[in-house]
Amino acid sequence: MNTKYKILAITLIFTCSIIGIFSIFGIGANIAAVIISAGVITLVFFRSINKIHSYYTNTHIKISEQIKELDESHHKGMIMVDTINELAGLVSAINNHLTLENENSLEHTKQLRELKISRDNAEFELSHLKSVIYSIAEGVIITDQKSNIILANRKAQERFDFVFDNNGPEPIEDVIMCPEIISLVTESNFKDNTYIELCRQFDVNDPETNVTRTLKLICWPVFDSEDRRIGQVIISYDITTENEIMMMKDDIINSISHELKTPLAAIKAYAEMISQGEFDNTNDAREMAVTIENQAKRLAGMIDDILYLSRVENGAVNMIPQAFNLVKLIDETIMTAAPIANESNINIVKKIDDNELECYGDYDLLYHAIMNLLTNAIKYTNPNGKVTISAKSDKSVIYIHIIDNGIGISEEHQKKIFDKFYRVPGAKNIKGTGLGLNLTKRVVEEIHSGFISVKSIPGRGSNFTICLPQLELGKEVLAGCTVNKNKYY
């Protein structure tokens, strides 16, 4: 039983007991009436207390239930109850607190949403950056300030034969077995916060092709927005081709210098002999003059090769298209090359069935291209050998073959002989600049929309083939139509 009921029961028992005692001892009715009135008042008082207590209890229960419901549903809301007296202030304070918490929650939700968007953007940008770095054609390695690899692209992993999943930092010495990279990173870390670019150049064996390649490593320090060093970037460049080009340029400069000096020396010597009258008769003077003329032509030919190639590369060649007899052009090249062939007793054979074979293009440029091939065949053919030049037409395409039985070209070098300045190793005793075949290829393919190819067997000779569009097809090409070169294979 609740306390209030216990108090009420005791009060009633006590009142009744007093009335009984008064009755026994004959106490007056007035006093009894007062006591009875007091009991009635007490009863009314406790009933009022009970009603008020019941109201407060129900209100507390409603408040508790609403707060519990808000907690369980994770919703934001207000306490909705009928309140009086002190409870009105309590409920108002609770609602004010809930309102403040709701506003704070909304602000936090907004900030959380903005942070999530920023995080997603940062993750996208980082992923995009990694994809770009991973796809770069040169090897890229990024390390932190403790020399741990944090990123390495595909090319770096292939080039230095290691595996890195880009999912977390790993010590560089545990991943890469290349001492040059490790020493470069170590040296870069010793530079503290100074921005110094470090370089290394070394040779490495390509595991796929088993070919030695020259690599260049460049290391840059990386700083954050507060100029604190946070790592370094190492990029590896394959400079094998660059080195080869530099060597070829040196060779071509030396070769050109030698080639120019030889005819100039002969011209100068014979010119001095003629000017000083150092000859016995008119025939000697005439022979000296012929020698000067031949050397001057040789000199002019080399200069023409260089100038023609420069003009073709710069697009400055003015093509003069015309229809002409191809057999006549070939006869002129044979006549020009005959003295060179006679020096080594080399026989030039012409095989053309149709003496009226017609071609369309620039006469001078094609003459220069065929002349280059013919003189090359003579130079690379052993004494007493044979060079054959033939031409035929087949389905609007003209095929010109220049075949020799000379020293031949290995398959490895056949892929490079049309490169500028390239000369087959071991043929340095044969005069040349390494420009003729490159010029011929450009004249045939870029200017005349044709095709040139080579088949060769070392020790047995070479077969150079030029394919050119004939008259009608040539006119279409010159008018801007596209010709499928695959048909020339």
Image (cartoon, grey):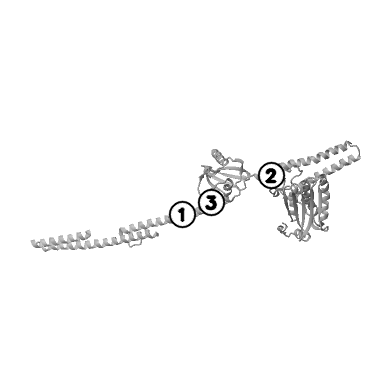
Report which residue position mark 2 lands on.
245
Residue toward you, 39 or 163: 163
Binning the other alpha carbons within 10 Å of mark 1 as few (below 14), some (14 to 19) or many (20 upward) gives few
Image location of residue 132, percent across then percent down: 57, 51
Instruction: Left or right? Give the position of 276 relative to 20.
Output: right
Q: Amino acid at mark 2?
A: Ile
* Residue at x 86% of width, y 37% of height: 273
Q: Nearer the viewer, mark 3 or mark 2?
A: 2
Q: Quadrant of the C terminus?
A: bottom right
Tell me the element at label 3.
helix
Binning the other alpha carbons within 10 Å of mark 3 as few (below 14), some (14 to 19) or many (20 upward) gives few
Q: Earlier in the sequence, mark 2 or mark 1?
A: 1
Residue toward you, 236 or 282: 282
Image location of residue 62, percent across then percent down: 32, 61
Residue toward you, 416 or 459: 459
Report which residue position mark 3 lands on.
126
Decide: is 113 above or below 242.
below
Tell me the element at label 2.
helix
Q: Are marks 3 and 1 in contact (CB under 8 Å)?
A: no
Residue closest to the far left: 25
Is residue 315 at least partly visible in the picture?
no
Image location of residue 444, percent across then percent down: 75, 53
Q: Amino acid at mark 1?
A: Leu
Q: Amino acid at mark 3?
A: Leu
Report which residue position mark 1 lands on.
112
Instruction: Left or right? Give the position of 386 relative to 236.
Output: right
